[in-house]
Amino acid sequence: MATAGNGSYDFRRSSSQVNWPLVVLLLLLGVVLWRLFDRYQLSELHDPEAVERPVMARGDLAEDEKSTIELFRRASPSAVHITTLAVRRDAFTLNLLQIPQGTGSGFVWSDKGHIVTNYHVIQNAQAAKVTLADNSTWDGRLVGVSPDNDIAVLKIEAPPSRLTVIGIGSSADLQVGQKVFAIGNPFGLDQTLTTGVISGLGREIESVTNRPIRGVIQTDAAINPGNSGGPLLDSAGRLIGINTAIYSPSGAYAGIGFAVPVDTVNRIVPELIRKGRVERAGLGVQIAPDQVMRQLGLKGVLILGFSEESAAEKAGLRATRRDPETGDVVLGDRIIAIDQYPVEDSEDLLNALERYKVGDEVTVTVRRDNTERLFTVKLQAVE
């Protein structure tokens, strides 16, 4: 190797000795070999003779599949998609705008255009649009609501020819293990069918008014946000409940859904259509706050007074009064039972009376002067 006089390497002499044509030839040869190798690999992966595979014969559908398909075909036209709207004023034009607020499900109750859904679906909404199975959309007008039962009725002006009324079943004879089918619009996906079984009966959930809804159906049919208000059907395609809630820490389906039983729906909806509200059955009494009873160390519901034309007063019950001679307060009757239902506080009284209709007769057990007395009271309509 040549070196300069000072012992350092002479790069100029070294670079002049590189055989550049040979270097270029080797690079080109490497590229050619790489392309040939790559093409060889591709030829191993690809098959130019590949064709579509023949379709296997399916055979007939299973009987349970046929029945599910037929059930959905018959029942799905009864299900509707509900979009709730909020009214806002445009900041620049000052025009009123309808802004989508949420979605839910419902079903056709009558050929007069009555639509049933959950109260919480339309709660706080200022308007609602109802989309039928044929994709026609109609303005929904509010007919009536029962927040305690989470039921609401809307009305649309669709002709009867466009309306498929749902068939009504019964929830009194349901059994755990029965097949059920839920139709609704989860996450805005309309006309969705999910299946499952009744996994529990006689459940109790809380309404938006914090009042208990009793006799609720528990199911493992997938119920997700947007399913609320939609129909829960039995295997005959009859309505047996309104899908209303799920139990889930995450807010999505976790295997436990709840439906308001159809027997409750069938009792409440006609009343909402007739009057726009539900008449509650009551005794016509004014009662003491539970806190007062706790302070007195007493159980039951103390009658403070009576409403006008009180059924309880007519039946002979006594209200709290002041003794005209001594001026002392004389406690009135304490209600401790309605028929076979014990009453320890005001919530018990409301829950017991909720089982009855206006005009029903009940036996009211009261405690008066340390003795129990029974009175027959014909229940009246109360606010």
Image: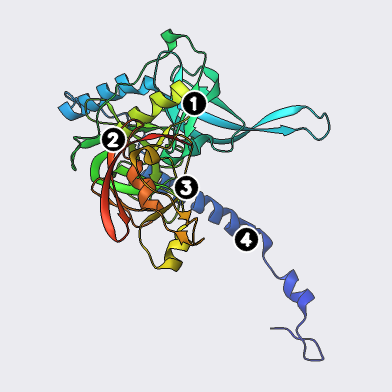
Q: Is residue 375 left or right of residue 305?
A: left
User: Which residue does the numbered mark 1 point to in the structure image?
Assistant: 276
- Checking the image for residue 374, the label placed there is none
Viewer-side label of 1, 3 = 3
The spot of residue 161 in percent (x, y) is 42, 8
Residue found at x 71% / y 29%: 97
The spot of residue 115 in percent (x, y) is 45, 23
Residue found at x 81% / y 90%: 5
26 w.r.t. 56: above or below: below
Viewer-side label of 1, 4 = 1
User: Which residue does the numbered mark 2 point to in the structure image?
Assistant: 361
Report which quarter residue 126 is drawn in.
Answer: top right
User: Which residue does the numbered mark 4 point to in the structure image?
Assistant: 22
Q: Residues within 10 Å of mark 3 (few under 14, many from 20)?
A: some
> Which residue is at the front of the view, 21 or 67?
67
- Asked if the residue under mark 4 is in contact with the one under mark 1, i.e. CB atoms within 8 Å, the reply is no
Q: Is residue 190 something one can see in this rendering?
A: no
Secondary structure at badge 1 equals loop
Viewer-side label of 2, 3 = 3
Report which quarter residue 95 is drawn in.
Answer: top right
